[in-house]
Amino acid sequence: MMWKLATAFLVSGALGLGLAGQPATPDPEKAFAVLEGLKIPDGRLYAPFYHGVIGPHAVVAQGMVFVTFQNAQGRPIVMAYRPDTKAWTAPAKAADFGLGPDDDHGNPALGIDRQGHLHVFYGCHGGPMRHARSTKPYDLTAWQEQPSPVRNATYPQVMRLADGTLALLYRAGGHPAPWSLQLSKDDGRTWSPAERVIEMRKAPPDPLACAYACFLPGADARTVHCFWNHKDDNAARVTATRPHPWRPLKYPGLHEAVYRYNVYYIRRDADGTWRNAAGEAVALPVSKAEADAKCLAYDSGDEFTFLGASLAVDREDRPYIRFGTGVIDWVRQGKEPEGAEKSKAVIVPRTDRFAAFADGKWQVTRELPGDWPADVRRIVVTPGSLAYGDEWPGGHWFITASRRPTKPGVGCAVFLLHDEAGFATRAGGPALVE
């Protein structure tokens, strides 16, 4: 099996079209599944999955594309598509547990072991990570609950390395908790003790220094690549009488989630050593001081960065990233009419940046570089998360979702597309997932 060695995460509308001409906001008629229109307390539709900090949401194996997402109760749903016959399996539940209508952060990540058993990691937002395993290889009809790999976790990300090891990465709790790694040498039956990889609050001491991280497998599946940014939870506590403890705040009073700065990068080599882009070993867990000194790919200053973007590696195992910059008031944005042309929530318009490490330093541009490998260029502009797994002749599979309602009573739509062949629609229309 050749393991798919690059990944991408959607930024809706960032570039409008992928290289293959696929729209960034797909037509609901192209969906293969739609959810009921349940809304969580802040008024948003319940998300089928996230594109950045949980993943992958699809894997390719044995000539099939296996996908996972959550229903409007947070329960993990699985389906499979066979491209040669254009046939879909019916939606099936991998487990009965879900976080429920008040929390959509427990959406699933999908892995596959050496024997072909599918693994779903789900249902955690600062609590026990749930784990379900298919009872038969390459079969989604029956699942068995597994022991929890970790008792306090958020945002699982899973990949299979070249030697068959399953690597499970996650945030070990709430916002300031470290991002950690556990390994399984026996197809997910047991897991190694957690290794703390990123711990931004360690140095300089700052209990509210956080990180949001995205991981992806390397070009030979022997390495693990990681991009992350600094989330500053001090900023949400700033008032007229309580200033920020260590920096003047340029944009006070916004939603706590938007205070994310800079872009950092490290990779894990086959021997377990974590290094920066220049190949220099970094001390674990990586603190903010260590990150600023050795791992900084982009310094955003007082402006914000968004890593719900696109990541890729080329065949030489060199990393690439597309990320967003700008300042948007998420609270105000959530209250504006759908499709408002002149958003009062936009303080600094969101724009793209493209970064790659070359000539001993990170090269950051505003336009997609023409000298990037064609495969990388296609990955970073195609909407959706790239499916891991078997190499696929003539292109890549991506899965994406929209939070826009498709019609009254029906919520988010889920799409599968090939960057050359287009959308994988379902005969009879999208499956309704209750």
Image: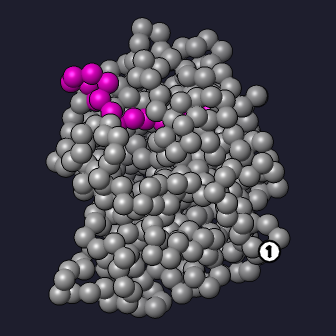
The answer to whether residue 173 is above or below residue 425 is below
Name the secondary structure under disc 1.
Answer: loop
The magenta stretch spans residue 401:
yes
The answer to whether residue 295 is above or below residue 322 is below
The residue segment tinted magenta is 396-411
Q: Nearer the viewer, residue 225 or 39?
A: 39
Instruction: Using residue 46 as the reference point, say whether residue 164 is left or right of it.
Output: right
- Label 1 is placed on what type of residue? Gly
Residue 382: horizontal and vertical position, in percent?
60, 38
The answer to whether residue 34 is above or below residue 177 is above
Q: Nearer the viewer, residue 1 or 265?
A: 265
Residue 126: horizontal and vertical position, in percent?
31, 63
In this view, the residue farthest toward the top is: 428
Residue 433: horizontal and vertical position, in percent?
32, 25
- Are there few (<14), some (14-19), or many (20+) residues within 10 Å of tag 1? few
According to the image, label 1 marks what residue? 360
Q: Quadrant of residue 1?
A: top right
Q: Is residue 3 visible?
A: no
Give the residue at x 60% y 64%.
226
Instruction: Using residue 311 as the reference point, say whether residue 12 is left or right of it.
Output: left
Residue 337: horizontal and vertical position, in percent?
24, 39
Give the residue at x 66% y 21%.
421
